[in-house]
Amino acid sequence: MLKVVFSSLLFAIVLGSGFVARITLHILLWHINPPDVSEDSVLNTLGGLLQHNCTMCSNIHNSSFNCTSQQETTTVDETWIWAVFLVIVAPYLFTFTSTLFRICLKSNIPINREVLLLVRLIKILQMGWGMLIYIYS
């Protein structure tokens, strides 16, 4: 019973963190505003469902606001581009440093060939199905 509860808890944690990571990536990509200011463009609005927030709002006479929306600007904020770059690159950097640390200290265990072949087969199938979905969708 304890194994089932613990497995369910781990599943919920992994599912929740995956959901947060996916939403965070979408928010980062949403803030990268393409420099297209035409009225009929639905780029970066999730098919017209999302509306852009005000990026610069100034209070004039305490009662009215003067807003310049992201859609009216023609520049792309490079801070969001760097944020997306770091979100994509950070896991690879962490993996590289941990693997380099293990190799330098010679603390790696011998590779089990059966496990290596199984992992390779799963990865090949995963990449194949991913490419099929990407190409034919």
Image (cartoon, rainbow, N blue to C red):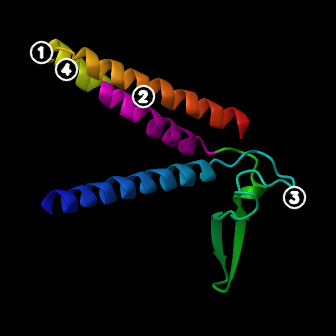
Q: Is residue 2 left or right of residue 80?
A: left
- Where disc 4 sits, the SS reads helix
Looking at the rendered structure, the kind of residue marked 1 is Leu
- Where disc 1 sits, the SS reads loop
Q: Residues within 10 Å of mark 3 (few under 14, many from 20)?
A: few
| Disc 1 and disc 3 in contact, CB within 8 angstroms | no
User: Which label's residue is closer to the chain start, 4 or 3?
Assistant: 3
Q: Name the residue that disc number 1 marks.
A: 105
| Disc 4 and disc 3 in contact, CB within 8 angstroms | no
Give the distance between the C-alpha atoms of the residues marked 1 and 3, in whole angstroms: 59 Å
Nearer the viewer's eye, disc 2 or disc 3? 2
Looking at the rendered structure, the kind of residue marked 3 is Glu
Does the magenta run of residues contain 135?
no
Q: Name the residue that disc number 4 marks.
A: 101
Residue shown at 56%/27% (left/top)?
128
- Where disc 2 sits, the SS reads helix
Magenta residues, as a range?
77-95
| Mark sitting on residue 122 | 2
Q: Name the residue that disc number 3 marks.
A: 39
Residue shown at 74%/52% (left/top)?
73
Quadrant holding the N terminus: bottom left
Q: Which x, y percent locates residue 72?
A: 78, 57
Looking at the rendered structure, the kind of residue marked 2 is Ile
User: Which label's residue is closer to the chain start, 2 or 4?
Assistant: 4
| Disc 1 and disc 4 in contact, CB within 8 angstroms | yes
Nearer the viewer's eye, disc 4 or disc 3? 4
